[in-house]
Image (cartoon, rainbow, N blue to C red):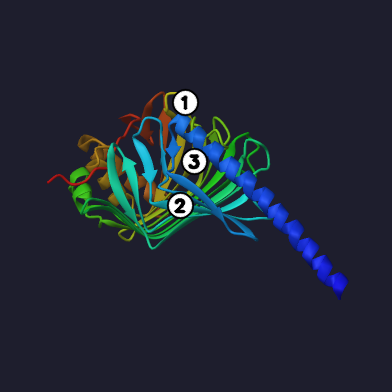
Amino acid sequence: MRRLIGLVVVLALLYGGYWAVGAQAVRRGAAAALEQARAEGWGSAEAVTLAGFPSRFDLTLHAPEVRDPQGSLAWRADLAQVFALSYRPQELIVFTPTTQQLRLGGQWFDLTNSDLRASAAVGLAASLPLSRGTLVGKDLALAHGTTPVLAASELRAAIRQAQTDPAPNAYDLGLDLLQLDLPRHWLARIAPQTDLPARIERLHVDATATLSAPLDRTAPAAPPQIEALSLHAAELDWGGRQLRADGTLSIGPAGQPEGTITFRSKDWQSWLALAEDLGLIAAKQMPMLTGLGTYMAQAQGGELAVPLAFQNGRMSLGPVPLGPASVTITLSPAQS
């Protein structure tokens, strides 16, 4: 019995020593990362504390802020917590508070939620390459002061190193948004003639993106650019109308897409009317597009499949040219 007790004590001391060494490494790494973030202008925190003995490393960042160097996009909160099991430190779980702030387009917005957490796994290389990550949120609401902007009942997002794409720096992406509420004043301003409700029931995306550089510890200071996008499936359910899309795009250095996205829907007339309302299609093109769509839908069993092609900075819907391939929608609060 004495030998057993002695063995337990020795193992406990060894494990405690391992945790202490690991904790010291975590502190040094966090301090170095924070110093780098401040120096490069993309993040900061007032303080960092560590707990979790003996089974975890629980890192708490007090008053953290993450931003792009230009300051147009930023996030901040009272605190953020990063948890890792002491025997699997390369797998992280991140918890954030129910109230935090986002800076978009030069304005700060309040982001509230009932649950918002993320997880990530990185490689053991010095550059800490991202292997996979997830983000899950419930009861999300974005507001500017007292003005609601966006809300969603649930968000699920995921990323992982591509499983089938042999291209370097390729990542599989997944997104599900449920019950996404758009601001009515915004919808009325950009599409005053639409009869679509302010709530989108579901948005689903399954895609693979090829980036200009890997997602690793250097990415915040020099964000990689998307060079190619394979859209395996995108599904939109809005006001009882469904829309599906798939296709492949390459993205040039200037951000211009080249390629084709094919849209499919039985509710194509409603989407065509919305495209006109958004200014994507000129009113004079509508009779021709409606007639062509009716003919094609009849030949396709009621569901219309039409390609949206991007080439040389311009886009066309089927055989109909639509003009320059540039659409910008600015998200901003209502004007008082």
In the picture of the structure, the residue carrying the numbered disc 1 is 252
The front one of 297 and 167 is: 167
Q: Which residue is drawn at 81% across and 71% down?
A: 5
Q: How far apart are marks 3 and 2 (CA)?
A: 38 Å
Q: What residue type is labelled 1?
A: Gly
Residue 209 visible in this rendered orientation of the protein = no
Describe residue 253's horizontal placement relative to residue 104 as left or right: right
Of labels 1 and 3, earlier in sequence is 3
Q: Nearer the observer, disc 1 or disc 3?
A: 1
Q: Which residue corresponds to mark 2?
A: 80
Mark 3 highlights which residue?
247
The answer to whether residue 82 is left or right of residue 16 is left
Q: Which of marks 3 and 2 is in front?
A: 2
Mark 1 vs 3: CB contact within 8 A: no
Q: Earlier in the sequence, mark 3 or mark 2?
A: 2
Say above or below: 292 vs 120: above
Q: Nearer the viewer, residue 107 or 313?
A: 107
Q: Where is residue 171 in the image (x, y as percent from the top left)?
A: 57, 42
The structure residue drawn at horizontal position 72% and vertical position 54%, both measured from the top left corner, is 17
User: Mark 2 Cα within 10 Å, few/some/many (few <14, many 20+)?
Assistant: some
- Which image quarter holds the N terminus? bottom right
Rendered residue at 74%/62% (across/down): 12
Q: What residue type is labelled 2?
A: Ala
Task: Tell whether 151 sits left or right of 311.
Answer: left
